Amino acid sequence: MATIKDVAKLAGVSTATVSRVINNTTYVEPVTQERVQKAMKALNYHRDARAAALASRSNNTLGLLTGNLADPFFALIAKSVEEVARSQSCQLVVVSGGHNAQREKEGLDFLISQGCEAMVVHSKMLDDATLLRYSAQLPAMVLINRTIPQLAHRAVWVDNRAGAAKSVDHLIASGHRKIACVTSDLPIEDRTERLEGYRQAMACANLTIQPNWVINQPFSEEGGEAAGKLLIKQCPEVTAVVTFNDVMAAGLMASLYEQGYKIPNDYSIIGFDDVLLARYLYPRLSTMHNPIDLMSTHAAKLALQLREQSNVLPSTNLFDANLVCRQSVSIPRQA
C-alpha cells in the first residue's frame, strides 16, 4: 500500500507539499499540484484520514528544543522563533532540555510525536552522533548555538573564540594585565571556545595566566556570586574579569559589592550575550553582544525552508559577537 512518502518521492516534492495538495490547505503551484496528483494516481494512493490529520498538523507546527526558559538568553531564543512561527501561520511547540542529555532526548522525541517536521534545536548535552541520527530522520532540523561539521549547512552559531578574545583585548587596551575568567562548570562547546578565546588573547599579549585565574561555576547568578567570593580569596591581584555570560557577571558584581568593592574602580568586568539586564545593572555592564535573536530568526526560517524543499542553497550561518562598551570597564586600580 502506497504511503504519502512514496507519493512525495515519485513527484519529487516534500511530504508537506503532498499534504497541501491532499488537504487543499494552502496554495500550491499548478504544475506541482499536477505532478502530485499524477503520482497519487500512478501509485493508486488513497487518502487515510488519520495520516492526513497528522500531516496537516505537522505542516503548521514548528518545534523548538531550548534550555532553561527562566534564563533571559533562552527566553530570547523562544521569543524570536515564536515571531517567525506567527509570521508563517505555524503553531510553536516548545520543550526545555535543561542542559540534561536525557531531557534533551525526551524533548526531541516529544516534538517528533507531535508531528513536528521543522525544528530549531538548542542541544548542548547530546553527543554529535546522537544529533546526527536525529538529523537523518529530520531533514528540517536546524541546530542553534552549536555546529557539527556534517551539519554546518543546518547549524547557526556564534564565533565564541573571537568574541571572548575581543573582550580580553579591550581590557588589555584599557591597561589591564591580570585578567581572570569566570566560566561555566559544564563541559559544553560555548565554555570550551570562550575559554580558548581568553587564553589566545592573553598569549598574543604575552601575558601569563595563573591557574587560579580561571574560576569554574554554574552559569547562573548564584554561580557568579560564588565566583566573586573565590576571586577575592584566591586571586586578589586580579584587576579585571571576563565572564561566561551576563547573568554570571550580574552575580559577580553583586558579590563584589557586598564585599566592599566597586565596579569599575576596583574591578573591571565584561559579560557575554548582552541580554536585557546588562543595560540595567549598575554600573551598566560592558559585554559582548551575541546576536541570538537574529540567529534564532535565521534558524527558524531555515528550518521552515528545509521543510518545504531539501535543496536549500547553503548560506552564511556563522555570526559575530561584538563589543558593547558601557560603564563596567576602566583603567586598573593602583597596586
Image (cartoon, grey):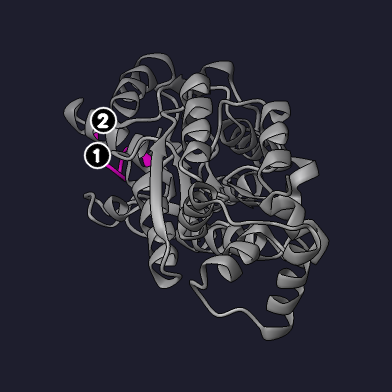
Disc number placed over residue 262 in the picture, else none: 1
Measuring from the top left, give residue 270's x and y in whole percent: 43, 45
Q: Quadrant of residue 34?
A: bottom right
Q: Is residue 225 above or below residue 292?
A: above
Q: Is residue 70 above or below residue 62?
A: above
To which residue does mark 2 refer?
Answer: 256
Residue 71 shows up from this direction: yes
Q: Quadrant of the C terminus?
A: top left
Residue 274 shows up from this direction: no
Q: Is residue 224 above or below residue 18?
A: above
| Mark 1 touches mark 2? (CB < 8 Å) | yes
Q: Amino acid at mark 1?
A: Lys
**104 relative to 219 in the view: left or right:** right
Q: Amino acid at mark 2?
A: Leu
Q: Provide the residue span drawn in magenta.
A: 261-268
Measuring from the top left, give residue 85's x and y in whole percent: 43, 63
Residue at position x 62%, y 42% from top? 146
Q: Callout 1: helix, strand or loop?
A: loop
Measuring from the top left, give residue 163's x and y in whole percent: 59, 50
**76 relative to 179 in the view: left or right:** left
In 3D space, how far apart are the residues under numbered discs 1 and 2 (Cα atoms)? 7 Å
Q: Is residue 156 above or below residue 199?
A: below
Disc number placed over residue 101 in the picture, else none: none
**307 relative to 246 in the view: left or right:** right
Number of numbered tags placed on the structure image: 2
Mark 1 or 2: the one toward you: 2
